[in-house]
Amino acid sequence: MSVYDVLIIGGGPAGITAGLYAGRAELKVGMLERLMPGGEVASTEWVENYPGFDEGIAGAELMTRMEKQAKKFNLEILSGAVDDIELEGKIKTVHSGNQTFQAKTIIIATGSDPRKLGAPGEKELKGRGVSYCATCDGPFFKDKDIMVVGGGSSGVQESLYLTRFVRSIKLVEFMDHLNAEKILQKRARENPKFSFFLNHRVVEIKGDQKVQSVVVEERESKQQKEFEVEGIFIWIGFNPNTEFLKGKVALDQWNFIVADEKMQTSIPGVFAVGDVRSKTVRQITTAVADGTIAAISAFEHIEKQFDGGE
């Protein structure tokens, strides 16, 4: 079995950047991705805060460009999900279906998935008015009244995208203030399609076969209101994709991977990057920075542990 110098698990901005840097260092590098490379960014309609694109760029196009660039330096794209992983010892082993991969170093870039509200009706009506992706589902709500949950930067940015389709947006935020970037808050507050329900929570999502209304509750007074809407978009954070790592590497209380400034985890030769890593800021720019650092750290580990990588 051929042993990779670097095996990257996950193909978002962090993983692809790690592949680019590892490839340029002339390491044998593979990237195992369960879906298509690109991660969450690939489903983001428009990116305005990635340097070098003064007019902005579509998320899918940005990730296509990143992947193409990394492939120029011999990044090998592998398809599959991780079933089991063995991290002890100098050579690491990854099992994916009927495939087995071995590597001198592992870079974990598995990202995170949208967090669920857990409200009655959410699971039952998912895909029938309940959505976690504006780019995917926005056009289905043309001239309709909808609700969005989450006042962070992601929630407000995606909500602003939805204004090109929908008639109105009721934005529900658990806190008594929005947490989005100031420029995004300004755009939302100046847009007549928005109405804001701060310090509220979703109690129930109702509908027969599709979303028809949502019940929200004011947190202090406990007063409930029911709004007729045809869709609800939920952006309340993410859960890290670390199920396959429990008991394998150190995780924080929210199950994000603990890694130091060199992206080194609790296991030598295993690094963590991007949204799966325990940190305070999760942006495309911080993801690519993580990928850069991890690739350099992996190279240094190989030089030290494998006699110059041979």
Image (cartoon, helix red, strand yellow):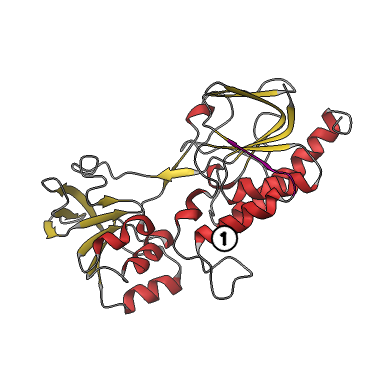
Residue 26 position within the rendered picture, expressed as x and y whole percent measured from the top left: 81, 43
- Give the SS element for disc 1: helix
What residue is rendered at 10% in x and 46% in y? 208
Number of labelled discs?
A: 1
Give 173 or 20, whichever is nearer the viewer.
20
Q: In screen coordinates, is 155 left or right of 56?
A: left
**Would residue 172 be visible to someone looking at this image?**
no
Quarter of the rendering containing residue 55: bottom right
Q: Using the image, determine if residue 261 lies above or below residue 166.
A: above
**Residue 149 visible, this orientation:** yes
Indicate the quadrant where residue 258 lies.
top right
Q: Is residue 181 above or below residue 104?
A: below
**Residue depicted at 57% across the width and 55% down the height:** 63
Residue 228, magenta (yes or no):
no
Mark 1, other Cα within 10 Å: few <14 / some 14–19 / many ≥20: some
| Quadrant where the C terminus is found in the figure | top right
Q: Is residue 55 left or right of residue 164?
A: right
What residue is disc 1 on?
62
Left or right of residue 6, residue 227 in this image: left
Judge by depth and name the residue closer to the eye, 244 or 142.
142
Q: What residue appears at the point 17 percent right and 48 percent down from the top-left corner?
A: 205
Quadrant of the snapshot with the N terminus: top right
Question: Which residue occupies 13% across, 60% down?
Answer: 227
Q: Report x, y in % for residue 148.
A: 28, 59
Q: Magenta span covers which residues?
A: 73-78
Q: Is residue 296 above or below residue 55?
A: above
